[in-house]
Amino acid sequence: METQTNVTFKWENATLLGLIEKEYENSFLIEVKEPSEEIIEKYNGRMVVSKKICQKLTD
């Protein structure tokens, strides 16, 4: 997947949507769309997520 791709992933039994900002060897830096208060407080609205759990959203 490339940067600026919309993806979905599971985190703590919730399905989240986000936009890939940067790609690493085994993970992505994702800007979470509509983050919860916990995600904003702990992660500033951005999370590093394993490539294995990310799925590209279809257009």
Image: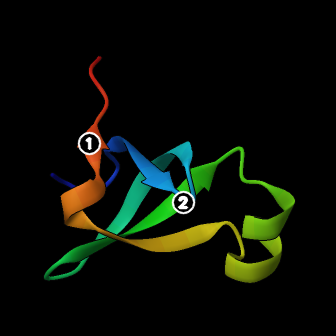
Q: In the visual, does 32 lie left or right of 8?
A: right
Which residue sits furthest front?
13
Residue 8, percent from left and from top = 40, 42
- Please tell me whether residue 9 is drawn above or below residue 47 in the rendered image: above
Name the quadrant of the C terminus.
top left
Whichever of callouts 1 and 2 sits on the residue coming sooner in the sequence is 2
Q: Amino acid at mark 2?
A: Glu
Q: Residue at x 74, y 81 (%)?
A: 42
Q: Secondary structure at mark 1?
A: strand
- Please tell me whether residue 43 is drawn above or below residue 5 in the rendered image: below
Q: In the visual, does 36 lie left or right of 18?
A: right
Q: Residue at x 67, y 78 (%)?
A: 43
Q: In the visual, does 46 lie left or right of 45?
A: left
Q: How is the image coloured?
A: rainbow
Residue 1, percent from left and from top = 15, 51
Q: Quadrant of residue 38?
A: bottom right
Tally of marks: 2
**Label 1 sits on residue:** 55
Q: Residue at x 72, y 75 (%)?
A: 44
Q: Residue at x 28, y 56 (%)?
A: 53
Disc 1 + disc 2, Cβ < 8 Å:
no
- Please tell me whether residue 2 is drawn above or below residue 39 in the rendered image: above
Q: Quadrant of residue 57?
A: top left
Q: Quadrant of residue 5?
A: top left
**Label 2 sits on residue:** 31
